[in-house]
Image: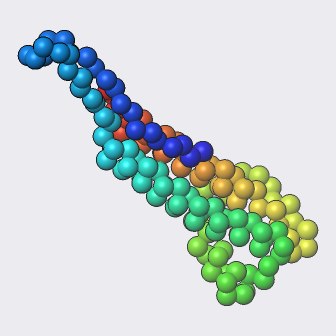
Amino acid sequence: MATQEVEKTTVVRDDTAPNDGAVVHRKLIDNDVISRRNKTAAIIYYILDVIEIILALRLVFRLLGANPNSGIVNFLYTISAPFVAPFVGIFHQPVSGTSVLEWSTVIAMIIYALVAYLIVQLVRISTQKTV
């Protein structure tokens, strides 16, 4: 998904220059804008990565039937609950013993990835400089 920005140069000939030869002007895309755009995208993707890791761990722990009374498991379920809450109840959760396939977590991971991608694209469009 990541793209690399390349510095672009436009050469414009100006034959109306006061000297006897043609003057060449170079217009460079503002490297600062590109840098800010890339930093913003990196921050958004970093936040997405943290959320996705938390949700993936929740999914694996629920699938393997981890003990919810364990400190780390309880902590993980607590911090991941707000991210999963909007998607609870969309699909039935198959249960086998203590194992649960939590479709709400899978859907949350997909939706958050799409939202992050769309936000990054919006940032890129809004900071695009026309030459």
- Outermost front residue: 20
Image quadrant where residue 83 sits: bottom right
Which residue is at 84% across, 73% downward? 64
Q: Is residue 64 left or right of residue 9?
A: right
Image quadrant where residue 52 sits: bottom right
Residue 126 appears in the figure: no
Q: Is residue 59 left or right of residue 65?
A: left
Of residues 128 and 102, the one nearer the viewer is 128
Q: Is residue 85 left or right of residue 98?
A: left
Residue 94 image position (x, y, % from top left): 86, 60
> Considering the image in quadrants, where does the C terminus appear?
top left
Residue 85 image position (x, y, % from top left): 62, 61
> Considering the image in quadrants, where does the N terminus appear?
top right
23 over 77 or under it: above or below: above
Q: Is residue 51 left or right of residue 40?
A: right
Which residue is at 53% across, 49% downward? 116
Which residue is at 71% across, 70% downward? 57
- Outermost left residue: 18
- Outermost right residue: 96
Of residues 16 and 93, the one nearer the viewer is 16
Residue 82 image position (x, y, % from top left): 57, 65
Which residue is at 67% across, 87% downward? 71
37 over 78 or under it: above or below: above
